[in-house]
Image (spheres, grey):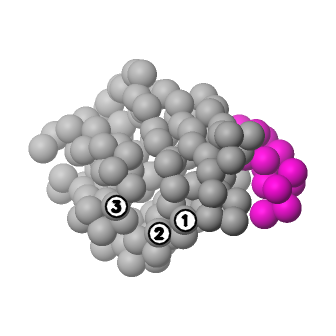
């Protein structure tokens, strides 16, 4: 797969919400950097991180509207959304959608770095209301 195909497959696996399948597309030294600049390093740490995130937001999704690449660096522009779980349920008032961008570094057909750019204010507001 070329870098764009790798990133599109990575997004597809994010949307499948299967951390094990997602981890198959990460390098062992994978780095995830969230929108606040906090980094999580290592495939296994991110496998656990995605499991936790899918428990928090079971219907999380990512959409790709525009994709650009420069060698092994791929930029994605689109949206992300889902519903923040509360007591095992997905209340309609906890649904969110935000514009977002991602920057990926691909190495040997795997995602080495996945960086998120998004304003998570709507998510924080839901968390505050729900006391999560």
Q: Is residue 98 left or right of residue 46?
A: right
The answer to whether 124 is drawn above or below residue 66 in the figure is below
Residue occupying the far left of the picture: 1
Cβ–Cβ under 8 Å for marks 1 and 2: yes
Q: Secondary structure at mark 2?
A: helix
Q: Is residue 17 left or right of residue 6?
A: right
Report, in whole angstroms, how far the alpha carbon at label 3 lies from the one at label 1.
11 Å
Q: Which quarter of the figure has residue 55? A: bottom right
Residue 26 showing in the rendered view = no
Q: Secondary structure at mark 3?
A: loop
**Image: magenta residue range:** 119-132
Name the residue that disc number 2 marks: 51
Label 3 vs 1, first from the N-terminus: 3
Q: Which quarter of the figure has residue 69? A: top left
Q: In which quadrant of the rendered image does the N terminus lie?
A: top left
Q: Is residue 56 left or right of residue 78?
A: right
Magenta segment's dominant SS is helix
- Give whichever of 84, 87 is nearer the camera: 87
């Amino acid at each position: 797969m070329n870098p764009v195909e790798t990133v599109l497959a990575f997004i597809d696996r994010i949307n499948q919400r299967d951390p094990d399948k997602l981890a198959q597309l990460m390098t062992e030294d994978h780095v995830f950097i969230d929108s606040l600049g906090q980094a999580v390093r290592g495939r296994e740490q991110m496998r656990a991180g995605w499991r936790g995130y899918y428990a928090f937001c079971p219907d999380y999704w990512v959409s790709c509207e525009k994709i650009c690449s420069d060698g092994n660096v791929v930029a994605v522009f689109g949206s992300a959304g889902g519903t923040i779980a509360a007591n095992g349920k997905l209340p309609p008032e906890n649904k969110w959608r935000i514009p977002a961008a991602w920057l990926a570094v691909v190495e040997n057909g795997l995602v080495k770095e996945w960086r998120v750019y998004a304003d998570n204010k709507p998510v924080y507001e839901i968390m505050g209301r729900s006391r999560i």
